[in-house]
Image (cartoon, rainbow, N blue to C red):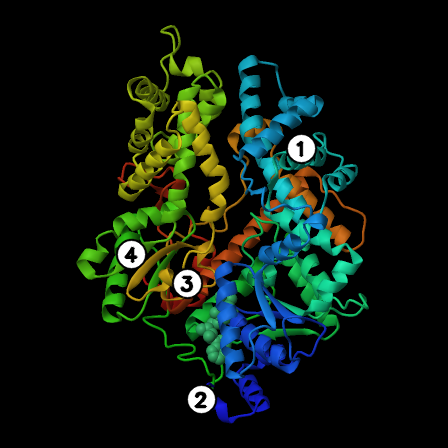
């Protein structure tokens, strides 16, 4: 492709490039303008062809800094990789590099908002960007405010489906509502409503259509309203505020036209992950300034079958699917269905899973969309330009094991990885897990690989764990500062439970009366063993508070939490930083304040942009979650612990919150908002589902997404896809201890395992 291009004319080079693309990819290169959707399969070369088509468009239309092509991607690393590809192509054509801009959606929004601070009302000099998780203090404060402002609704929740007025139960329910149910609800609805483009007032309006006894949507609207008020008063902004700020700028006719005049068109990658608000922003930019009814110059490329963020972000593949359907009616939908990444066997397995899942989505579920868009992956043609496209399978290509237990799983993987990476040191391998705890367990078991076999083991979630250290320490210090606060006691117990130091139990019951729990009188019944252990641990922590100077408390707590080597080092670093920061004003309170500041402002920087090349080095075994594996590939992919209770799993009502009914309020609110937005999108009046109906819908959406996650994971493999489902495993991974003290239980395999074995009998490796 790059040979001898100096001798060719620009037209000839463009022709060559076009020829180097696969049939589906060529649609992108042939685009002349208007709206277009490209629905692609995993490994189809979306980013590759988007970059080629972008360079061709820039050349054909002679774009420049005042008339640019805007390319939008979802992560900063994807943005920089596409940018490099386009630059290289333009260089070949000897064209300047100024006719385009590659941005993440939020980067683009900030770019627009910061140019017009008066219109965007966004002052980046003073504003702090926050990610409001349920435990974030802004969410907690919104909940407290709401409780004061809506005593009647709060009382109604407290009474739940039945209540006999008993004091201890009342206190327990208060704790559950204040520290679990309402923060979760606030977090979910703020995210869902805001990125769907709804204001608190619009959620209030929707709630008028609801008929449930708690008025869940009215509670949601109230929480959202409080959140917005608090954010404004503290000069905080969240990610959606950036997009809203850009949209406010573009409401101004003259400014909007100026922006539209400077944008030739917009190409969007990973379009299945867009929220309605994001779609709105790029559509406005892509519109013709003089005729908004004209089809916008907008290409959206995505794979709806790889939408795996919809249960924790408001992205929803339904919007991209609708966009595809709209384009299809106008003959503007193209598909990229050839992919060169995987061997034929792996492609067949992935295709089979896709069609089987859609098939079992039986008539009872026919209200919800099917999990997958029906498109099967095809192998590429024999003259495909991709090197080693559809490589030969290694072993059986698909190998399925049913080990006796998770420990046998470990030895099977160990044997296979050592054999494969020793014989093929240029190749790489990954174990894809559903939960971080599984990854931790495997990383511990394989820690000796590097020394004994020269195989590097790289556990990706390690850095995530480090970023939780300040928060965990802070929670414990708050408890030491005010041990009689039920909230602080509960957060401490949660940390201890998460770290496997106490067993899983109803923490609300323990924390309702801190005094009684910490210092029981001899008259009280002998507590159960697990409660005794929790109590003793808490008392030990309190004792240390009296005995140690407070600057030594942080390393002490790190030790008590059984942090390992590098975690301890991080704790030490944290301690010395806090020490520096609080010199001259050193007290437990100032330490907590300093920690709080680190937690609020730095989470944001810790996100994203880890170097993806580190994940795919040769002779390395990467241990990574299925979510994080998206967009990457390895020669050998291992997927252990495929059990039905996790994949596809099901939604559960937490025991502590059962007094509210047989549904989770946050999930219900989200499903209600979602269906209301969908009906509005289709210009109908909002349809608000009944709570049980919404709960069922939420459960189906979760299952559908889990199956898509499985599909994403399977399609990461190039030469070997190794899957297993052990017969015995832990009841739950988050309370599992790897010292073999946890009793294992019988586990049911993920339903696709028997289906795959049945269809591909030669893949079954356990006899
Ligand atoms: N026409 C082509 N010529 C040469 N190489 C290609 C072509 N199309 C795709 N490729 C190569 O195929 C590989 C996969 O492409 P890419 O990573 O863009 O796929 P993708 O569609 O983003 O996959 P996924 O969505 O599964 O992550 C890349 O190495 C890319 O360079």
* Discs 1/3, front: 1
User: Marks 2 and 4, Cα distance to the nearest angstrom?
Assistant: 39 Å
State which mark lies toward you, 3 or 2.
2
* Sequence-earlier tag: 1 or 2: 2
Left or right, residue 515 beside residue 688: left
Residue under circle 3? 757
Name the element at disc 3: helix
According to the picture, the residue beneath numbered tag 1 turns out to be 226
Dot in front, 2 or 4? 2
Can see residue 204? yes
Q: Residue furthest top?
A: 523
Quarter holding residue 126: top right
| Label 1 element class | helix
Sequence order check, earlier mark of 4 and 3: 4
Number of numbered markers: 4
Residue under label 4: 457
In this image, 57 relative to 511: left or right?
Answer: right
| Alpha carbon distance from label 1 to label 3 | 53 Å
Q: Pointer 1 and pointer 3: residues touching (CB < 8 Å)?
A: no
Which circle's residue, 1 or 3, is located before the other in the chain?
1
Q: Is residue 513 above or below residue 264?
A: above
Frontmost residue, 298 versus 351: 298
Q: Secondary structure at mark 4?
A: strand
Task: Return the residue at label 2.
Answer: 3
Secondary structure type for disc 2 = loop
Mark 1–mark 2 distance (CA, rounded to whole Å): 62 Å
């Amino acid at each position: 492709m790059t040979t001898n291009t100096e001798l060719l004319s620009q037209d000839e080079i463009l022709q060559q490039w076009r020829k180097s693309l696969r049939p589906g990819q060529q649609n992108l290169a042939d685009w002349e303008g208007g709206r277009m959707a490209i629905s692609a399969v995993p490994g189809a070369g979306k980013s590759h062809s988007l970059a080629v088509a972008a360079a061709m468009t820039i050349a054909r239309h002679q774009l420049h800094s005042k008339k640019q092509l805007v390319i939008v991607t979802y992560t900063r690393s994807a943005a920089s990789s596409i940018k490099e590809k386009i630059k290289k192509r333009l260089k070949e054509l000897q064209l300047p590099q100024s006719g385009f801009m590659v941005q993440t959606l939020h980067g683009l929004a900030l770019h627009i908002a910061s140019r017009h601070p008066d219109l965007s009302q966004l002052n980046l000099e003073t504003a702090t960007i926050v990610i409001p998780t349920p435990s974030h203090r802004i969410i907690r404060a919104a909940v407290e405010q709401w409780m004061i402002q809506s005593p009647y609704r709060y009382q109604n929740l407290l009474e739940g489906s039945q209540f006999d007025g008993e004091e201890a139960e009342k206190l327990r329910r208060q704790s559950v509502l204040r520290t679990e149910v309402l923060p979760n609800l606030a977090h979910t609805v703020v995210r869902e409503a805001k990125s769907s483009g709804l204001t608190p007032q619009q959620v209030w309006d929707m709630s008028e259509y609801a008929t449930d006894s708690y008025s869940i949507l009215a509670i949601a609207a109230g929480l959202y309203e409080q959140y917005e008020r608090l954010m404004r008063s503290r000069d905080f902004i969240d990610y959606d505020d950036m997009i809203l700020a850009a949209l406010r700028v573009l409401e101004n006719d003259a400014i909007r036209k100026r922006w539209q005049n400077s944008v030739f068109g917009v190409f969007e990658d990973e379009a299945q992950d867009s929220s309605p608000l994001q779609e709105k922003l790029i559509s406005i930019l892509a519109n013709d300034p003089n005729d908004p009814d004209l089809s916008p110059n907008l290409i959206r490329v995505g794979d709806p079958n790889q939408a795996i963020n919809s249960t924790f972000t408001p992205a929803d593949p339904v919007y991209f699917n609708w966009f595809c359907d709209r384009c299809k009616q106008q003959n503007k939908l193209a598909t990229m269905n050839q992919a060169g990444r995987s061997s034929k066997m792996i492609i067949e397995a992935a295709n089979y899973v896709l069609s089987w899942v859609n098939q079992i989505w039986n008539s009872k579920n026919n209200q919800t969309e099917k999990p997958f868009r029906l498109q099967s992956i095809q192998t590429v043609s024999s003259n495909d330009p991709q090197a080693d496209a559809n490589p030969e399978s290694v072993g059986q290509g698909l190998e399925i094991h049913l080990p006796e237990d998770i420990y046998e799983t470990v030895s099977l993987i160990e044997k296979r990885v050592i054999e494969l990476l020793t014989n093929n040191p240029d190749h790489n391998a990954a174990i894809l897990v559903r939960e971080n705890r599984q990854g931790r367990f495997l990383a511990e078991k394989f820690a000796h690989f590097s020394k004994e076999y020269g195989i590097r083991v790289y556990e990706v979630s390690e850095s995530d764990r480090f970023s939780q250290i300040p928060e965990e320490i802070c929670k414990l210090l708050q408890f030491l500062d005010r041990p009689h606060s039920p909230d602080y006691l509960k957060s401490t117990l949660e940390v201890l439970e998460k770290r496997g130091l106490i067993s899983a139990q109803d923490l609300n019951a323990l924390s309702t009366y801190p005094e009684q729990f910490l210092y029981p009188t001899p008259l009280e019944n002998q507590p159960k063993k697990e409660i005794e252990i929790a109590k003793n641990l808490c008392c030990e922590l309190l004792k240390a508070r009296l005995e140690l100077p407070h600057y030594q408390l942080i390393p002490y707590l790190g030790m008590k939490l059984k942090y390992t080597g590098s975690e301890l080092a991080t704790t030490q670093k944290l301690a010395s930083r806090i020490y520096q920061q609080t010199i001259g004003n050193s007290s437990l309170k100032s330490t907590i304040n300093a920690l709080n500041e680190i937690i609020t402002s730095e989470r944001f920087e810790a996100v994203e942009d880890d170097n993806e090349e580190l994940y795919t080095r040769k002779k390395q075994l990467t241990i990574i979650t299925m979510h994080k594996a998206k967009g990457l590939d390895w020669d050998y992919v291992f997927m252990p612990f495929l059990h039905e209770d996790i994949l596809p799993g099901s939604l559960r009502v937490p025991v502590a919150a059962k007094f509210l009914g047989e549904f989770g309020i946050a999930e219900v609110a989200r499903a209600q908002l979602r269906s209301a937005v969908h009906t509005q999108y289709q210009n109908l009046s909002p349809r608000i589902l009944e709570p049980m109906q919404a709960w069922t819908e939420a459960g189906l959406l979760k299952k559908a997404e889990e199956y898509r996650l499985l599909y994403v994971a399977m399609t990461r493999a190039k030469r070997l896809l190794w899957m297993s489902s052990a017969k015995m495993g832990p009841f739950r991974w988050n309370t599992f201890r790897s010292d073999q003290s946890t009793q294992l239980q019988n586990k049911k395999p993920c339903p696709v395992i028997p289906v795959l074995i049945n269809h591909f009998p030669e893949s079954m490796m356990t006899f």
